[in-house]
Image (spheres, rainbow, N blue to C red):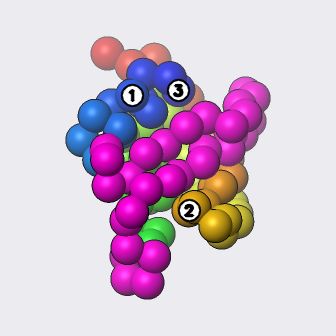
Amino acid sequence: MNRAVREYNKYRSPEANARIVSASKESFKIEFTGPYCRTCGFYDYFEDLIYVLKDFGVESRIDEVEETDFGAIVSFSITEKRESE
């Protein structure tokens, strides 16, 4: 999870920054902050993390998006985990 978030931030920061809020074997929450567009493509930033996680062997989906003053806290479920190569 940490490696995937670092990889995400490597290519999307400073426009969008991800930070792990909490994580378990079944789910995790990520806080997204930054000056990214909140009207068009809002969910694209969250969905991008799903693709990065897939590269690390974790299949996930978005369960809930809680908008905040500075971005959003997004709850994800882990749907499958495999050994990454």
- Mark 2: which amino acid? Gly
Real-space Cα separation, disc 1 to disc 2, in angstroms = 18 Å
> Circle 3 sits in a helix, a strand or a loop, which is it?
loop
Q: Name the residue under label 2.
A: 71
Q: Name the residue under label 3.
A: 1
- Horizontally, is 60 left or right of 68 in the view? left
Q: Quadrant of residue 47?
A: bottom left
Taking depth in this image into account, of 48 and 54 the one nearest to the observer is: 48
Q: Where is residue 67 in the image (x, y as percent from the top left)?
A: 65, 69
Real-space Cα separation, disc 2 to disc 3, in angstroms = 20 Å
Residue 35 against residue 24 in the figure, above or below: below
How would you rate the neighbour count of disc 2 (Cα within 10 Å): few for under 14, some for 14-19, many for 20 or more? many
Q: In which quarter of the image is residue 68?
A: bottom right
Q: Position of residue 48 (x, y in %)?
A: 37, 53
Residue at image location 32% in from the left, 15% down from the top:
85
Taking depth in this image into account, of 36 and 65 the one nearest to the observer is: 36
Real-space Cα separation, disc 3 to disc 1, in angstroms = 9 Å
Residue at image location 56% in from the left, 62% down from the top:
71
Residue at image location 45% in from the left, 17% down from the top:
83
The answer to whether residue 65 is visible is: no
Residue at image location 35% in from the left, 39% down from the top:
8
Question: Disc 1, disc 2: CB below 8 Å?
Answer: no
* 72 inside magenta stretch: no
> Circle 1 sits in a helix, a strand or a loop, which is it?
helix
Residue range (magenta):
13-41
Which of the marked residues, 3 or 1, is nearer the chain's N terminus?
3
> Circle 2 sits in a helix, a strand or a loop, which is it?
strand
Q: Name the residue under label 1.
A: 6
